[in-house]
Each structure stands twice: as structure tokens, then as C-alpha cells.
Image (spheres, rainbow, N blue to C red):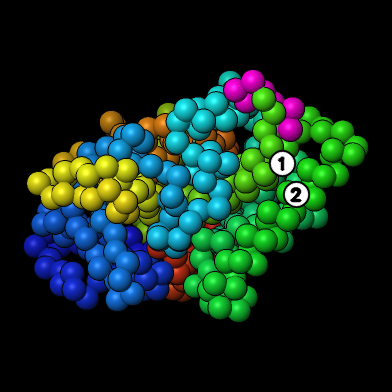
Amino acid sequence: MKLSTPKPDQKVDLSRINLLDPQFFATGDPHEVWRYLRCNAPIYFQQLDDGRGFWSVTRYDDVCRVLKDYNTFTSQQGTMLCILNKPDIAAGKMMASTDPPRHTEMRKPLERILSAGALQSHLPGLRRVAADLLAPGLSGDLWDFAQAALMFPMAFTGALIGIPESDWKHLARQTTMSIACDDPEFMEGSPEETLRLAHHELLAYFACEIARRRRTGSGDDLIGQMMDMDVGGNRLTNEEIIFNCYGLLLGANVTTPQAASVTVLAMAENPDEYGRWASRPELLASGIEEGLRWSSPVNHFMRYAVRDIEIHGVMIRRGEAVVAWIGSANRDEQVFDNPYQFDVGRHPNRHVAFGFGPHFCIGASLARYALRALFSELLRCVERIELVGPVAHLASNFVAGINHMTVRMIPR
Ligand code: HEM
């Protein structure tokens, strides 16, 4: 997705904007539209030709409110625009599609496994994975960083879940297919067929894996731990394990590469800022946080109102969909000084790239560790990054992504 700096007085004809259209996110300018909505229509209804429609909230405070208040805005009827007004088959079974209290029961034991403290022992492994990812780029040859980054999370989340390396490539593609079924590069048949195929491949993969382990023993990886874990006094069902494996893999695969690619792009475009970052090791963590705010890999999450509720004097009716645009919240000028400026030392930085409230990303610590490993290696080894040629963006209303980005990394 294009990360533009919209002009403050730019007018937008909303009747010409379709926030559902994946192509709009590949070639259009969502930031211009979001800025206009924040200023002029903080609660905005888009009516679709087929009779469906959805509300958008774009201001930081409203995004947080919708994501946090699960008593008013449920996650159990679908959380992504691509399934607007269609049933969510994972409702009540997968964490992201389940409201408290069941959500809390499922999340607690997984939260312990994925906590910053519990992941400490993985840090040396993460550093190796980061160095392996960067190695081909350090020759100084032209290199498609965005393509290489797509495999990055498989090497830490895939391994953590218990997926053998031989399956990483196939599963990484299936996860992107399931969030970008309209992108020509990932389509296998029509968008509907692409989505169906990806879901089938991923769910069947985990179903087979669990069946195998029921015969041979659960193992000590994340799948094994999920099979044995106590959730509200019971074990998870097969279906719950399958959906949660899917959720964890999807959560990691479609986001972390984009945080890395978009940050690399920002550094190629701002060599002075890159120089500042490289010369001030104490800014490693704040630079990563700024990369997360800047890239906002997840554009939106959706909820449904379970009762009539008023926002900014507008009545949202029970059953209506409300889309919280995270990418917009992270540029809200009421919260961030100079929001369209990448500042590696930004402080405070209350970005919501990982969401807000009960569904706050459970993989946030893992993603932060992985990105710190990657960028500490990059800053150590690379003098400067040059962008070579145009950037190809992912067609997805869900993930702000880059498909191709050729760079030359000049080694130190
Ligand atoms: C830069 C990387 C990442 C970003 C930007 C990101 C973003 C998000 C966001 C915005 C949510 C909130 C969902 C909601 O409100 O409905 C979320 C939830 C989630 N994420 Fe991440 N994520 C990242 C990395 C990861 C990783 C590495 C994993 C796996 C280890 C993961 C797994 C999940 C899961 C399972 C949920 C659902 C949590 C729940 O419902 O309680 N994510 N993520």
C-alpha cells in the first residue's frame, strides 16, 4: 500500500471511494482518504451495490474503543472485511473470532508460552534466522527484499508451532492467499476459489498433523502444547486447535514481513534517518516501534455491533459491521506529532499496530524480538539501502503489503 503524505486541505469525493476494493489498496491512496475521514466524517457508512454496507471509524480513540469494547462490538461474526456479512466458521473456536469469557480461557495458556520472558531462550535462534535472511542481500547485488521477507516468520513462528521446513514455502503462500485472494500474484482461480483453496490447505494441514500426533504423541512444540493444555478445565477440541494453529500462523506470516519490508523501504527513502538509526544503538527499539506504526501491517479489524450504539451523534444499529482502520489511527494527528514523518526516536509512540484491548496481538513479543534481531543485524552490516525500480504493492484491504521491492544493500 502506498504510504503517502496527504495534503491537509486535500478534498476527497467519498462517492468514488471503495474501501472494500483490494485494488484500491494496491494502486490508490488510502492515507489520503483516511485523513479526510478523520477530519470530516469520523463515523462513515459505505453502502455497497449489493445491499451490504459497513461503518468505518478512523480516529485513534474510536479505533481503540471499538477494538476494546467487546460487550458492544463482537468478534464472533467475522473480523475481516473480506467476509462481510458472511458467517465466520471459526467463531467461538479461534481466539481472534471469540469474545470473552471463552476468549480469555483460550488465550491465557498461550499468552504464557508467547510471553517476552518465555521467549528469551529463542533469542539466539532468532538472531541466526535474521542473519540468514539478510545474507543474500549483503553481496551488494540487486535483491527483492519483499520476496525474501515473506519466508521470515516461517523460520521462527513455523518452527515454534512445529512445522517442518519442507512445508514452510507452501504454507507461507497459502497464508498470503487467504488475505490477498484478489491479488493476481496469489490467485489460483477466482478470488472465492483462492480463498477456499487456501483455507482448505491450511486447515487440512493442521488436521492431519493433529491426527498424526494423536497416534504418535503430542510433542513439545506449540501444537503439542495446545493439545495438552488446560483451557477452562478441559482440553481444546481438534477444531479449536486447528483454528488456533491457523490463526497463529496467519497472524505471524502476513504481518511481520510487511513490517520489515515497509521499514526497509522507509530507510531507503530516508537515508539520513537510517544513518541516525545506525549511529545510535539505543534507538533500536524505538525505531522498530516507529516501523510498526509507520507500516501498520494490518489495515483494519472489523466488529459487529450487538446493540444500538451512538458514535459522534450517529446511531449504529445492532447487527451492523464497524471497521476499525488501524492504519488510520496510527497517523492520527491528534495523537502523533508529525504523523507522516518517520522518526526512529519517536517518543511517546502509542501506536496500535498490534491492536488494542482483549485481542491485542498475542505474538507481539515474538514479532518485536524478530524485528529487533533483523534490524540490529541490518544496521550493523549495511551502510546504506538503495531502492531500485518501482515497488509493487499487495492487493488487499486487510494487509498493507509489498509484493516486490528490489533493493541494493551497500555493505559496511
Ligand atoms: C508485526 C507483526 C504483527 C502485527 C502487526 C500483528 C497485528 C495484530 C493485530 C492488529 C491483532 C488484533 C486483532 C483483533 O483486534 O481482532 C492481532 C492479533 C493476533 N495476532 Fe498478531 N500481529 C503480528 C504478529 C503476530 C505473530 C508473530 C503472531 C504469532 C505468533 C500473531 C498472532 C496473532 C493472534 C493469534 C492474534 C489473535 C489474538 C486474540 O484474539 O486474542 N501475530 N495481531
Mark 1: give few (<14), some (14-19) or many (20+) Cα within 10 Å: some
For badge 1, the amino acid type reads Asn
Instruction: Tell me where residue 17 appears, x and y as whole percent.
Output: 25, 71
**Real-space Cα separation, disc 1 to disc 2, in angstroms:** 7 Å
The verdict on residue 252 being magenta is no
Name above or below for residue 340 compared with residue 335: below
Is the residue under label 2 in contact with that under label 1 (CB below 8 Å)?
A: yes
Return the residue nearer the eye: 404 or 264: 404
Q: Residue at x 65, y 37 (%)?
A: 126
Return the residue nearer the eye: 92 or 161: 92
Q: Residue at x 40, y 61 (%)?
A: 84
Instruction: Tell me where residue 341 appears, x and y as whole percent.
Output: 26, 49
Q: Which residue is mark 2?
A: 207
Q: Which residue is mark 1?
A: 238
Question: Main structural element of the magenta stretch: helix, strand or loop?
Answer: loop
Which residues are drawn in magenta?
A: 227-233
SS for callout 2: helix
Q: Residue at x 90, y 39 (%)?
A: 215
Mark 2: give few (<14), some (14-19) or many (20+) Cα within 10 Å: some
Query: Residue 287, can we see it?
Result: no
Give the image quarter of residue 100. Answer: top left
Relative to residue 140, is residue 362 drawn left or right? left
Return the residue nearer the eye: 311 or 182: 311
Q: Residue at x 52, y 46 (%)?
A: 91
- The CB of the residue at mark 1 lies under 8 Å from ligand 1: no
Q: Earlier in the sequence, mark 1 or mark 2?
A: 2
